[in-house]
Image: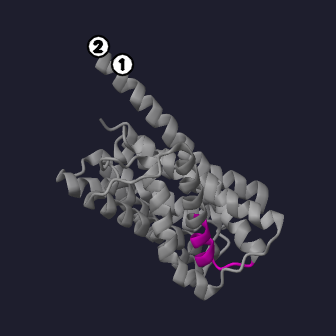
Amino acid sequence: MSLSVVVDARAKSRAVVALVAAGVLWGTGGIAGSLLAQRAGLHPQPVAAYRLLVAGGCGVLFLAVTGGARLPRTRAAAVRLVVAGALLALFQTSYFAAVTLTSVSVATMTTIGSLPVFVAAGAAVLDRQRPDARTLISVAAAVAGVVLLSGSSGAGASGWRLVAGVALALLAGAGFAALTLVNRRQVAGLDGLRVTTYGCLVGGVLLLPAGLAFGMTLPLRADVLALALYLGAVPTMLGYAAYLRGLRDARPVFAALAALLEPLTAAVLAAVLLGEHLGVLGWCGAALLVAALAGSYSRR
């Protein structure tokens, strides 16, 4: 076995670990954001702004301590950070609005469940390759899973709230898919940590006007401050940095599929901490999403 093959295998193994870690960390984000909104009395918009701003602040602090805060002064780097920030802002605000209208489980599973579909479709367009039969079957299974999940008796919403919540969750999925496709190729001098740090800052600034309009007053209580810090530092800063690190050595579709660990984590936490229940249809939908994951992953 040549050295290049060994190095490539190790890089892919590290990518898998990073992507799995990202999925698990993200699974705690919906719970933390929901609890922060409840305990601080905040609208989803300021919660999304706080999440990105705190994440960016934590990243800047870490980079400053480690001596890596400087950015390349190139047009490509500037464009990448602005685009990443805009997509992060779109994803966060759409996702938290979906959580408010439906539930943590439904919003998370719909968002992440649709992600592989959007990424596979986007990659097919960008790479000018028609999707094969296995990809189409996986897409159909994922869509069916989302439909069943949305119709779960434990959705916590019905009527226009359910329709609007699912639509916002799908918008969040599309935004994150675009972020995945944009970052599948690195810009010189920008690693995953820098893109996450400065992208979060840009996204947070973009969300500030709407956040301020809804009110961003944060009660100075230990539980509220701890939730805000956790939400920004762990599922956001660490989660996105791990995801972008793994994306460097993995196919975009695989990275998107690995993100399906998020709804599994979120569903367990929502059941334990918030008393949410997906119901039989919801879990059937989750099973179909996992089947879509397996079908797409086995494609060579």
Does residue 169 appear in this view? no
Way the structure is coloured: one colour
Q: Nearer the viewer, residue 147 or 206?
A: 206
Which dot marks residue 113? none
Which residue matches tag 1?
Answer: 6
The answer to which image quadrant residue 255 occupies is: top left
Secondary structure state at the residue bearing disc 1: helix
Determine the main secondary structure of the stretch shown in magenta. Answer: helix
The amino acid marked with disc number 1 is Val
View extreme (bottom): residue: 213
At 68% from the left and 56% from the top, the residue drawn is: 230
Secondary structure state at the residue bearing disc 2: loop
Marks counted in the figure total 2
Segment colored magenta: 41-51
> Where in the figure is residue 232, as x and y percent of width and height?
62, 59
> Where in the figure is residue 165, as x and y percent of width and height?
55, 75
Which dot marks residue 2? 2
Q: In this view, does 251 lie above or below 214?
A: above
The amino acid marked with disc number 2 is Ser
Q: Check if residue 270 falls in the magenta segment.
A: no
How packed is label 1: few (under 14 Cα within 10 Å), some, or many (20 or more)?
few
